[in-house]
């Protein structure tokens, strides 16, 4: 877009040219939500739902090599897929039989503690071992098609003040390996909490305030007298 402006008094003109890049590749967006916000306690379940949408002009293609050069392995075999993944947040454990998708063709995947990154099992629905869940698609995701999937976690005893979590999707956009990360979703154990720590003669609190599933944090220093 080219924009030219000229002043009346001095007849000075200026020109500004903006360039907008377009692509015919696949572009996946990924959003995440939780059915619980503030006030979760030990023993509570939190259900996460992820929705992806291909807003690009081409199909999102399965890929076996990811953006960092890693390979996806399923039951020990290198596998090409559009991979939606989510590492369980700290202070939670997986709820068995909660992983699922409303989209046909999705393969439920589980990574156990001790398994290498991006190495998944199709028969691994075990709450005591699962540290990451995923859903894979061996078929392309066409333009304007949406994918929905989700899972639940149980809050462990002595939960952290805020349980932050986001999801990722890895795929080939038709040109190269691509990755998108969802918005972070917080679930707080308390709506507001201030913790003070005496360190090097100064009281230093970390103040965390959560409202409507959005958290702000700030550090305040008070000198000890």
Image (cartoon, grey):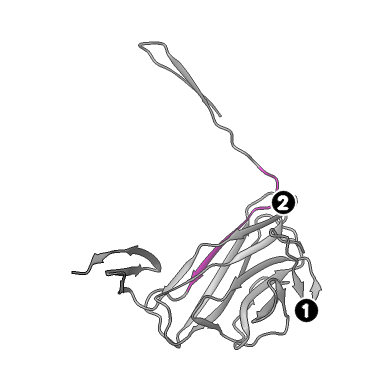
Q: Position of residue 12 (x, y in %)?
A: 43, 13
Q: Residue placed at 66% from the left, 51% from the top?
A: 56
> Quick one: 149 or 186, which is closer to the camera?
186
Q: Estimate how packed mark 2 is, as few (under 14), some (14 to 19) or many (20 or more) residues with alpha carbons within 10 Å.
A: some
Left or right, 198 with reference to 146: left
Most extreme residue toward the top, as rendered?
10
**Circle on res. 58:** 2
- The residue that mark 1 highlights is 75
* Position of 153 relative to 136 (above/below): below
> Quick one: 218 or 142, which is closer to the camera?
218
Q: Position of residue 184 (x, y in %)?
A: 49, 65
Residues rendered magenta in the picture: 23-34
Q: Position of residue 50 (x, y in %)?
A: 57, 68
Q: Quadrant of the N terminus?
A: top right
Choose top left, top right, bottom left or bottom right for residue 212: bottom left
**Circle on res. 62:** none
Q: Secondary structure at mark 2?
A: loop
Instruction: Please tell me whether residue 72 belongs to the stretch shown in magenta.
Output: no
Q: Residue placed at 68% from the left, 54% from the top?
A: 143
Choose top left, top right, bottom left or bottom right for residue 96: bottom right
């Amino acid at each position: 877009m080219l924009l030219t402006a000229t002043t009346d008094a001095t007849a000075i003109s200026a020109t500004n040219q903006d360039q907008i890049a377009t692509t015919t590749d696949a572009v996946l967006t990924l959003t995440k939500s939780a059915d619980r916000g503030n006030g979760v306690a030990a023993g509570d379940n939190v259900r996460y739902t992820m929705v992806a949408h291909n807003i690009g002009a081409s199909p999102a293609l399965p890929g076996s090599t990811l953006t960092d050069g890693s390979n996806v392995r399923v039951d020990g075999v290198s596998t090409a897929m559009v991979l939606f993944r989510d590492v369980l947040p700290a202070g939670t454990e997986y709820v068995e039989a909660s992983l699922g998708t409303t989209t046909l063709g999705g393969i439920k995947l589980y990574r156990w503690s001790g398994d290498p990154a991006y190495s998944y099992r199709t028969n691994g629905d075990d709450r005591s071992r699962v540290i990451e869940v995923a859903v894979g698609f061996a078929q392309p995701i066409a333009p304007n098609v949406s994918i929905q999937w989700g899972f639940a976690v149980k809050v462990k005893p002595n939960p952290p003040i805020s349980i932050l979590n986001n999801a990722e999707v890895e795929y080939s956009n038709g040109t190269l390996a691509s990755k998108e990360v969802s918005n972070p979703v917080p679930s707080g154990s308390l709506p507001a909490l201030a913790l003070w720590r005496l360190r090097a003669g100064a009281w230093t609190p970390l103040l965390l305030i959560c409202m409507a599933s959005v958290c702000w944090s700030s550090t305040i220093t008070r000198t000890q007298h």
